[in-house]
Image: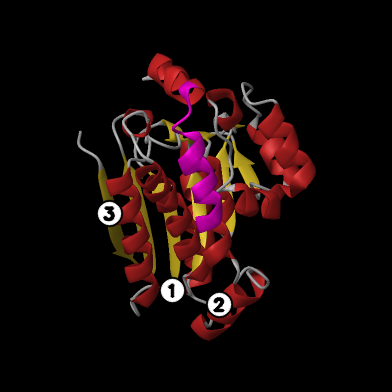
Amino acid sequence: MKAYVTLKIENKVGYIEFYHPNRNSMPSDVLSQLEQTIIDAGKNDAIRVLVLKSGGDRTFCAGASFNEVVEIEDEDAGIQFFSGFAKVINAMRKCPKLIIGRVQGKAVGGGVGLAAATDYCLANIYASIRLSELSIGIGPFVIEPAVSRKIGKTAMAEMTIDAESFFSSEFAKNKGLYAEVLPTTEALDMAVKTLVSKLASYNPEALSHMKQVLWEGTSHWDVLLLDRAKISGKLVLSDFTKKTLKRFR
């Protein structure tokens, strides 16, 4: 299957789904589509609440596309690529609709950032998480504000430093990334549907104001995340990172 980003509306709920055949990794074109889809959904009066999900099983998002990252040859291209994650997170942050995350499998790097940028996230038992960036020569700089906001600096540091380990879905729940962990994907989908059905029946003005309250104190992220993208954009050009990425390609 080819990569895609889709928006489907059912009963005042907008379901945004992204997919890439390589474990739902995120090349720049998918990131750009996802950003614009979130922006458009936020302006759609037919939608009261959003669900962010990915296609396929057992992998929610593998983070940055190594195939694209390894081809980056100059700093501007590196900054542009990592700005894609910054723009998606900021689009989620500024979207006037509550965004519910549905994580059906492993989340790595930028995938953890996407889960953290949702307003409320549900997962299944397969939804372990890993921040592998230091092990490949960069770091989770762009997603750090979103992840630290959800799980705290201490847990963020633990995951970042132990970069080659997966942390369980229960760890993610205990630290606040997931609100609930369900035993199966079917149970996860039922829980998501039940939650968003309730939210879609609530006062949309109240939901919008609540969204603003939840993200108070983050208006500086427009600048902060792009500054963080510059750090990754430089580091990705290092010999260490190039050699490491070629092994995983």
Q: Secondary structure at mark 1?
A: loop
Q: Secondary structure of the magenta portion, mostly? A: helix
Task: Tell me which label, 1 or 3, sits earlier in the chain.
Answer: 3
At 64% across and 22% down in the image, what residue appears?
A: 165
Q: Which residues are magenta?
A: 226-239
Residue 59, placed above or below residue 219: above
Q: In the picture, which quadrant includes the C terminus?
A: top left
Q: Which residue is mark 1?
A: 48
Q: In the picture, which quadrant includes the N terminus?
A: top left
| Mark 1 neighbour class, 10 Å CA radius: few under 14, some 14 to 19, many 20 or more | many
Q: Which residue is mark 2?
A: 207
Foreground residue among 109 and 141 = 141
Q: Amino acid at mark 1?
A: Arg
Q: Tell how many labels.
A: 3
At 44% across and 63% down in the image, what residue appears?
A: 50
Q: CA distance from mark 2 to mark 3?
A: 23 Å
Verify CB contact (< 8 Å) between mark 1 and mark 3: no
Residue 72, placed above or below residue 249: below
Q: CA distance from mark 1 to mark 3?
A: 17 Å
Q: Residue furthest top?
A: 247
Q: Amino acid at mark 2?
A: Leu
Q: Secondary structure at mark 2?
A: helix
Residue 217, placed above or below residue 132: below
Position in image of residue 210 (x %, y %): 61, 76
At 37% across and 50% down in the image, what residue appears?
A: 80
Q: Quadrant of residue 133?
A: top right
Q: Amino acid at mark 3?
A: Thr
